[in-house]
């Protein structure tokens, strides 16, 4: 008998019953998965397989087809009957609900269950997820002594071969699931009723659409919300945004003059409604007057791995692999460009990265970055890793200045920015006549750059490496060229 619900569909129901229904009956409305999302899912699969080494020599009951779990359910029952010590992907079905457990280990009094997650902590959704799994396993007649989450430990640092027991942390959630267990039968009944309905539940959009994670049917459910709406008002709380929306106030021109907004929020609304640009020449001039030439314009790119690939690195630790550097000796001088992209050969790129950077950015003048916290954090990490270069790196850190400030604080603001101070919003807004340079690139954002290089680094990249290197260099170069052009705009604004 086929199942009506699975662990994943149950959790969809917990999040939103409309999501549950659409997933079953209108899968064609699902948002298309990006390459980055696919890479994240693959990463989770890889972490799950690696965690099996915590309990080796088990039997793998992964189904040949995820559309047919019947053989796996039968094989699991047989394995438990003959007392198998370790089972991977043990499958159970109870009351029309399917649950597969990553690792099942025989204990003195029954079995202990382990669900593997590629995160670095136990999230509330994992507890609800675990309650459903425990309900199905116990309902199948198995004595469940304990149930735990196995997650990555971000305090672990790679030294030589991966230490499996150091990489993972195991946390029992047996006590945490108890308040949820009693609710599970009623939830199952309710979700089955939803699935057999003739139409989708009328669930309005709300905070649940993005919390605790974004729903993959948002493109459908939010189709009547304009691209630019009250949901884009900066620093406005979620409840207030939905309060406005429920009142029929959707676009910024519908916001009453009496609505209480901060000064920056009012600038955003007024700029959109009246197509007005805001320029605070006095504050921009103060910012510009403090700049010390020669100027450097700097941008880093990083990669990260769930399972560390490089010595002295931790799960998800950003590893610098590329930078772009434009330099100006003075306002009238010719722009120079320097760049570094480490070979994707499996070797640690960080020492070559910082040694080249120290050489090329010199010792004098300011270094402009965009959103200073990231570059500063990366440089501090490099100073700790390479104490022989700490003094020079600290000197670089002391020269950093943040070009985001005039745009973030709305000293320079145009309606086209739509209140995003990100470089990928500000640059196209101010230079729309240049065909939006980022959109024209094969790699057009940092997440894509990180994913491509990481795949090249670990050998999983399937496309042309030389083309990828060319694309990476072009993307990073545009990031610092954009900084140069934004600075020119600030100078123009004060003349």
Image (spheres, rainbow, N blue to C red):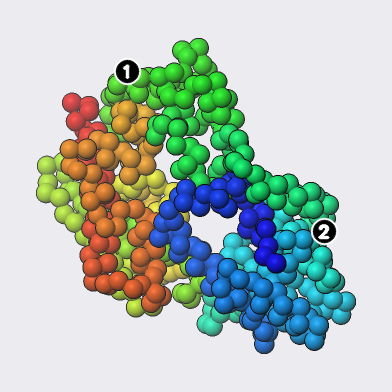
- For residue 16, the mark is none
Is residue 47 in view from this perspective? no
Q: Secondary structure at mark 2?
A: helix
On the image, the x and y values in percent for residue 92 come to 73, 69
Circle 2/circle 1 CB separation < 8 Å: no
* Quadrant of res 6: bottom right
Mark 2: few/some/many CA within 10 Å (<14, 14-19, 20+):
few
* Quadrant of res 176: bottom right
Look at the image and tell me in which quarter the C terminus lies: top left
Depth check: give the residue in front, 432 or 26: 26
Name the residue carrying label 2: 175
User: Mark 2 vs mark 1: which is more N-terminal?
Assistant: 2
Depth check: give the residue in front, 182 or 492: 182
Mark 1: few/some/many CA within 10 Å (<14, 14-19, 20+):
few
Q: Residue furthest top?
A: 258
At x 51%, y 21%, the residue is 248
Q: On the rendered structure, is 488 left or right of 55?
A: left
On the image, the x and y values in percent for residue 420 come to 39, 36
At x 30%, y 71%, the residue is 463
Query: Gap in Å between the C-alphas at discs 2 and 1?
Result: 57 Å
Look at the image and tell me in which quarter the N terminus lies: bottom right
At x 88%, y 76%, the residue is 109
Name the residue carrying label 1: 274
Q: Secondary structure at mark 1?
A: helix
At x 35%, y 67%, the residue is 453
Q: Is residue 260 above or below residue 300?
A: above
On the image, the x and y values in percent for residue 425 come to 33, 40
Is residue 271 in view from this perspective? yes
Q: On the rendered structure, is 320 left or right of 97?
A: left
On the image, the x and y values in percent for residue 117 come to 62, 65
């Amino acid at each position: 008998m086929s199942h009506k619900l699975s662990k994943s569909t149950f959790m969809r129901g917990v999040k939103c019953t409309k999501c549950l229904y659409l997933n079953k009956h209108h899968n064609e409305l699902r948002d298309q998965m990006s390459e980055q999302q696919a890479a994240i899912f693959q990463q989770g699969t890889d972490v799950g397989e690696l965690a099996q080494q915590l309990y080796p020599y088990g039997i793998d009951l992964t189904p040949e087809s995820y559309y047919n779990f019947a053989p796996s359910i039968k094989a699991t029952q047989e394995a438990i009957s003959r007392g198998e010590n370790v089972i991977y992907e043990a499958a159970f079905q109870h009351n029309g609900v399917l649950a597969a457990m990553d690792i099942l280990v025989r204990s003195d009094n029954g079995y202990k269950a382990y669900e593997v997650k590629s995160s670095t902590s136990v999230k509330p959704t994992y507890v609800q997820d675990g309650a459903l799994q425990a309900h199905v396993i116990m309902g199948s007649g198995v004595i469940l002594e304990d149930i735990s989450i196995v997650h990555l430990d971000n305090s672990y640092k790679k030294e030589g071969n991966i230490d499996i027991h150091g990489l993972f942390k195991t946390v029992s959630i047996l006590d945490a699931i108890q308040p949820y267990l009693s609710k599970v039968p009623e939830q199952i009944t309710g979700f089955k009723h939803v699935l057999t309905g003739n139409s989708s539940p009328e669930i309005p959009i709300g905070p649940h659409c993005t919390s605790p994670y974004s729903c993959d049917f948002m493109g459908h459910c939010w189709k009547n919300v304009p691209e630019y709406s009250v949901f884009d008002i900066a620093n406005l709380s979620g409840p207030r945004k939905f309060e406005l929306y429920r009142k029929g106030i959707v676009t910024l021109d519908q916001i009453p003059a009496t609505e209480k907004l901060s000064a920056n929020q009012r600038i955003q609304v007024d700029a959109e409604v009246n197509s007005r640009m805001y320029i605070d020449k006095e504050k921009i001039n103060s910012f510009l007057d403090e700049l010390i030439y020669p100027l450097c314009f700097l941008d880093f790119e990083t990669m990260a791995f769930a399972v560390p690939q490089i010595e002295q690195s931790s799960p998800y630790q950003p590893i610098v692999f590329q930078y772009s550097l434009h330099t100006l000796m003075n306002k009238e001088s010719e722009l120079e460009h320097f760049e570094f992209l480490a070979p994707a050969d499996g070797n640690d790129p960080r020492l070559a990265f910082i040694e080249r950077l120290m050489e090329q950015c010199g010792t004098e003048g300011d270094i402009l970055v965009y959103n200073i916290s990231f570059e500063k954090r990366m440089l501090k990490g490099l100073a700790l890793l390479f104490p022989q270069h700490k003094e020079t790196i600290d000197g670089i850190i002391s020269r950093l200045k943040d070009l985001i400030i005039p745009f973030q604080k709305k000293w320079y603001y145009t309606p086209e920015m739509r209140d995003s101070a990100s470089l990928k919003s500000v640059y196209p807004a101010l230079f729309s006549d240049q065909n939006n340079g980022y959109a024209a690139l094969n790699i057009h954002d940092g997440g894509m750059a990180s994913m491509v290089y990481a795949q090249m680094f670990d050998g999983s990249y399937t496309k042309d490496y030389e083309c990828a290197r060319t694309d990476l260099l072009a993307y990073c170069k545009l990031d610092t060229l954009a900084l140069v052009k934004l600075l020119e705009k600030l100078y123009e604004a004060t003349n």
